[in-house]
Amino acid sequence: MLKKSLLNDAWRLLGLYEAAHLKVWEEDILDEALAFTTTHLKSLVEHLEIPSFSTNILRTKLLALVTTIDDIFDAYGTLEELQLFTEAIGRWDTDSIHHLPEYMKTCYQAVLDFYREIEEMENIERQFCVHLAKDAMKSWVQAYLVEARWLQEKYIPTVATKEVFDWVLQNPKMVRASATVIRLMNDMASLKFEQERGHTPSSIECYLKQHGVSEKQANDEFHRQIENAWKDMNEECLKPTAVPMLLLSRLLDFARAADVIYKDQKDMFTHPGEVMKTNIRMLLIDPMPI
């Protein structure tokens, strides 16, 4: 049972809503959470308060830290220095600062201070959130160190190996799930337009003829299959796999693109309106700096 105390907490509702999209099979509670948060977020839209000043300050500090660490790994640190910084983050203690070069000490201390500030803000029941956030920072810095090693070794990682092609040709669950989202969302969104101009029967037309149901019933079934496909993709991304995560991410991105292009059964691929034009402009012409 989801707590009623969530009802007036927009940020916690939004966090739960986003987490619920990582649902996999046999996690009925996340299905319930998604329905719960979707309903109550809609009712809160007109009454949301502006985020607290302290929350904005924390986000700004985090962005500054991320940018600084990114610069250290990309432009300033030697591999030996980056190794020391990564080890210090892994130990996460004040004594480690003495092993760092002078220019790294300020950044390292700022990281410790930032997460200490969060700890002081959180209550006892939510201390696990800070622990998870620290683990995320450690993993992120480790990934940067791997990239730094690649740069020094002039190594260019590749996804296109024989093993990868063999895996794709076997039509594994991840490939099938991504294709399902793309195909069904496309067909539901473009049904009317393709019927008017004459087109090869789509999956929804085939389903209508095969099962003798109404268009609404067919759409409901396709929405169910799409939800199941997302569960399959989440499951495949969360467990060890025989292929690089980079490849799974590409398949996931194809499905995400379909979700944007055919959202709410609108074919913005064939008929790009202002929303799609804005998306393209923000992505390619006026991108937001990260």
Image: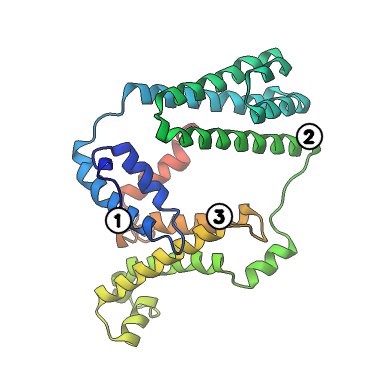
Marks 1 and 2 in Cβ contact (< 8 Å): no
Residue assigned mark 1: 35
Q: Tell me the quarter of the picture where residue 241 sits.
A: bottom right
170 relative position to 265: left or right? right
- The amino acid type, in three-letter code, at marker 2 is Gln
Residue assigned mark 2: 152
Q: Which mark is residue 238?
A: 3
Q: Can the viewer see residue 60?
A: no
Marks 2 and 3 in Cβ contact (< 8 Å): no
Q: Closer to the N terminus: mark 1 or mark 2? A: 1
Q: CA distance from mark 2 to mark 3?
A: 30 Å
- The amino acid type, in three-letter code, at marker 3 is Leu
| Location of residue 55 in the rendering, given as x and y in whole percent from the top left corner | 37, 26
* SS at mark 1 in the image: helix
Q: Which mark is residue 49?
A: none
In the picture shown, does residue 54 fall above or below 190?
Answer: above
* Front residue of 71 and 136: 136
